[in-house]
Image (spheres, rainbow, N blue to C red):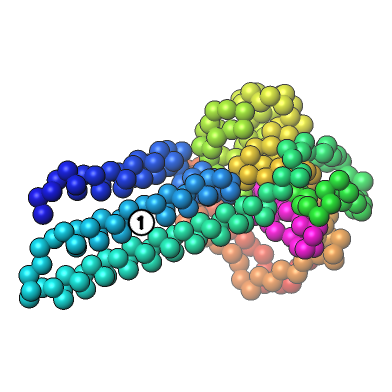
Amino acid sequence: MGRRRLAALFAVPAMLVLLILMYQLRQGVVVFAARFADPAFSLAAIVIVIVAGVWRLASVVHAFLVGEHLRTRRVTDRAVAAVLAAVIVISHVGVGGLLLVTYNAGSQVFNPDIGQAVPTPSLAPGETRGPTLVPLPTRVAGGRVTILFIAGSTQGDLYDSIMVVSYDQKTNSVQMVSVPRDSGYFPLYFGGVYPYKINYLAESVRNGVLKSPEGKDQAAGISTLIKEVGYLVGIPINYYASMDVNGFVKMVNAVGGIHVVNPKAITDPTYDWLDGGRTRMASTCPPARTT
């Protein structure tokens, strides 16, 4: 309608929201999504979504009220304004509702009564006393106990399975979340950004590639990984358990083994392990039941 200043005024909040979004995405989508586990971050996002929705709705209503409407187009103009208003309300309410679910989940998972607990030392990888019953700490009455399970190869500290398990003593329920082993370029709890994948974190500390405040050995690598996962997920980790491939084999054997049926040989001549074609996937196992 030629009212450029008014149009610019209504456009400013949208541009600010866009700039905030671009800034939050500077470290990648994975880091941005992980931040919603923080209730404060989710609450701020809810406020932004609501305020932006109200402002967008106000701009549409204002344009409709001050605009000139021809008699032949009044019905069409009203219909268009109503559709635009409905789209704005539904989209912002939907996004706000999703963020509210995230906010409630983060508030329920994070228990301020636990505090920033230091992970309890456990046996080093390769050492085991066998299954034992460990009573839950009575100091966290009605709260949560969070355990980090990590599993990897028999050599080094390469952990490909990273899972956070949170036990709610009040509801006697368990919630679990897996941290993708390929998560990379994430912020470190002691400052800076880790430029590799998270499954290399403990090994990087042990080899001195990454200088950690926990030290420089195998225990320091595991401790760094524990605290980093707690930092990324947004909850303190009270305990951890580590298992290698040999431990996994023992667990499988303890339950009587697993039956595998190969109806035919497994062969893929196109499989490439990024080594110039030297490694291929081929199995000559006969079709038989093995344990």
Check if residue 169 falls in the magenta segment: yes
Nearest the eye: 162 or 286: 162
Side of 178 where 57 appears, left or right: left
User: Can residue 1 be seen at all in this image of the molecule?
Assistant: yes
Q: Position of residue 244 (x, y in %)?
A: 76, 46
Quarter of the image with the N terminus is bottom left
Check if residue 177 falls in the magenta segment: yes
Question: 23 above or below 245?
Answer: above
The magenta-colored residue range is 160-178
Nearest the eye: 221 or 257: 221
Question: 205 above or below 277?
Answer: above
Secondary element type, mark 1? helix
The quadrant where residue 186 appears? top right
User: Can residue 182 be seen at all in this image of the molecule?
Assistant: no
Q: Which residue is mark 1?
A: 54
Q: Position of residue 128 (x, y in %)?
A: 88, 44
Q: Position of residue 270 (x, y in %)?
A: 47, 56
Side of 265 where 222 appears, left or right: right
Task: Identify the residue at horizontal 44%, vertical 60% (top origin).
Answer: 95
Q: Amino acid at mark 1?
A: Val
